[in-house]
Image (cartoon, coloured by chain):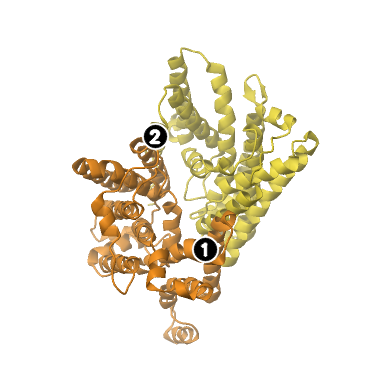
Chain colours: A yellow, B orange
Amino acid sequence: MIALKRLPAKPWIWSFGGAALAYAAAVSFTGGRGAGPMVTAALSLATFSVLAGLAQLFVISLGPGNVDLSLPANIGLASAVAMKVMDGSDALIPLGIAAALGTGITIGVVNYVFIWALRIPPIIATLSASFIIESADISYGRGLQIKPPPDFAAFAGQQVAGIPYLALLTLVLTILAAIVLQRMAYGRSVLAIGQNSRAAWLAGIAVERIRCVTYILSGALGGLNGALLAGYFRGASIDLGNEYLLTSIAVVVIGGTSVAGGKSNVPGLWGAALFLVVLQIMLNTFGVNAGARLITTGLVIIAVITASGGRQMPR
Amino acid sequence: MVGSPAVTRIVRFAAPPRRLVRAGLPVLSLALVLLGIAWLNPRAISYLGLNLMLNLALPIVLATIAQMFVIAVNDLDLSIGFFVSFVGCVSVTLLPKEPLLGSAVLLAALLAYAAVGALVQLRNLPSIVVTLGMSFVWQGLALVILPRPGGTAPVWLGTLLNYQVPVVPFPIVAAVAVGLVVHVGLMRTSYGVILRGAGGNPAAIDRAGWSLLGVKVFAFTLAGLFGTLSGLALIGLSGAADPNIGNGYTLLSIAGVILGGGEFVGGRISPVGAVIGALTLTLASSSLLSFLHIPPDWQVGANGAILIIVLAARALVTRGDR
């Protein structure tokens, strides 16, 4: 009973509810046609938003000013690297994924070196890095039209009982991430730094090491996302990651993670991602044009954050 | 930091005061970029050369000032670039054909900015998220008004923006004028102090009897006003619009404020610094690159690299400052 009373206070419950409502509206509009495929499509697309959001969540949890703006460029470059290394051959799939992860990790290291050595705000450091990564991608991926290996493309589109493998894989990843954040020393340190980095440092936490690991983790997740996206959309492209700049931040915040850091909510990522994706699908089935779709998405983001309250005033 | 007088004196002796360093850094960054250009192509530092290189400086300066007002009250505006695009689309479609309706739409957009400020304050919401939502809204509205690139700028706007001043290039005159006006307004008036105080210590401003709601609404309205001016200036210079014409300004404006010595929290901002930061970015992002003969693939990357180099030079100068 007490748990039930607390429910409305959890913003991420609302986003699951919102997703269900939008789904119901879309299905009733089509008269029940395409109800199953709609779920599969929503889960597939939400998976990529969740992965991008997960990367951003760890970084944002580090506290004010921490954000990874290099994620879209990272996804773009990693997708190109993965496709080039795999070279359309099934035998090279593991190597390609490893290469994409390596690209992401390198980007994470570069981001952190900029932040640490130049002592500039992460928002500017990752922005500068993203410019450089984008150029590397343009130069490296020029004319790149390699299709993903057949097995990899099949895996990216495969599903069991309407649930895509990728969604299941990402579900496992998010459960692991939640355990890491709530139960392991590294995750607790991230949250402690987000609440008060000076206090965390005084308590003996290696603040800089944790920050370094977090930016690398974000980079690695971005790289993985790039490889998977290239598999799902049958090839790499420079603007593959573009939409994930705003989306990654949106799903983190709608999912109930505090932008002030120190308080994160992993399950909320799924609710928020599903909500945003189903909303798009619903507006699509209504035949709404691109402009109106964007306006609705924006207003919904504002409405959700307004309804769920935001930060409480410190007393 | 308050130390004993003796300690303060020793520190002063060893290094210039921190405030001076903060004020000097943006100038240093600009000097670095200008030196780079002069070294690569001395003829570029001339009336004509600067006029060409700084052609698009004014809209960037105005957008940076807009962002600065929001940063002054501890918020961040992720929507300013999309807002500039939106204003651009309105001013090539509605404004020339139906000036009254066009002006009304721009005024309504300004009210929307004020409303965002009020919402952020009243519900105590993170501004990043609200402006993130607004960025989708402006993007959508821009697409609705102008689905594909085109339109024509009003004649008066083109005339105004292509005005030529003798001796000193027009973009520099305009930037100095904007910088001075905002500097006087924000650093030399009592309400300017209140506005920055709301970023430094909101509780104190509240206790002193000022309305935090009023301050926030005022700051966001000013941001909207300067965003509108930025969009108009951009259209006056380019003659036509594209629904994505100003999107890059969001990140550019944040970088400009920080390059200008501003800080994300604490109401520590500098209008003159922000203008210099914006000029630095304009120069670094276009002119320097064309003189360096950077291949087109690496243009964007060189932008990032220059930003990093300028910031690295600053880190070297301020070493031991913190």
Q: Which residue is drawn at 51% across and 60% down?
A: A121
SS of the residue under disc 2: helix
Quarter of the image for residue A309 reads: top left
Q: Quadrant of the N terminus of chain B?
A: bottom left
Residue farthest toward the right in the current orientation of the protein: A91
In this orientation, does residue B104 appear?
yes
B301 relative position to B199: left or right: right
Q: Nearer the viewer, residue B202 or A81?
A: A81
> In 3D space, how far apart are the residues under numbered discs 1 and 2 (Cα atoms)?
36 Å
Q: Residue at x 42, y 23 (%)?
A: A287
Mark 1 belongs to which amino acid?
Ser
Identify the disc placed on residue B143.
none
Tag 2, which chain? A
Q: Do the numbered discs 1 and 2 sit on residues whose CB atoms are within 8 Å?
A: no
Q: Percent x, y for residue A82?
A: 70, 42
Q: Is B192 drawn above or below residue A224 in the view shown?
A: below
Q: Is A106 drawn above or below residue B179 in the view shown?
A: above
Quarter of the image for residue B26 reads: bottom left
Q: Percent x, y for residue A114?
A: 59, 62
Q: Nearer the viewer, residue B234 or A268?
A: B234
In this orientation, does residue B322 appear?
no
Q: Percent x, y for residue B277?
A: 42, 66
Mark 2 belongs to which amino acid?
Gly
B91 relative position to A110: left or right: left
Tag 1, which chain? B
Residue that numbered label 2 is attached to: A291
Q: Percent x, y for residue A181?
A: 61, 44
Residue that numbered label 1 is attached to: B290
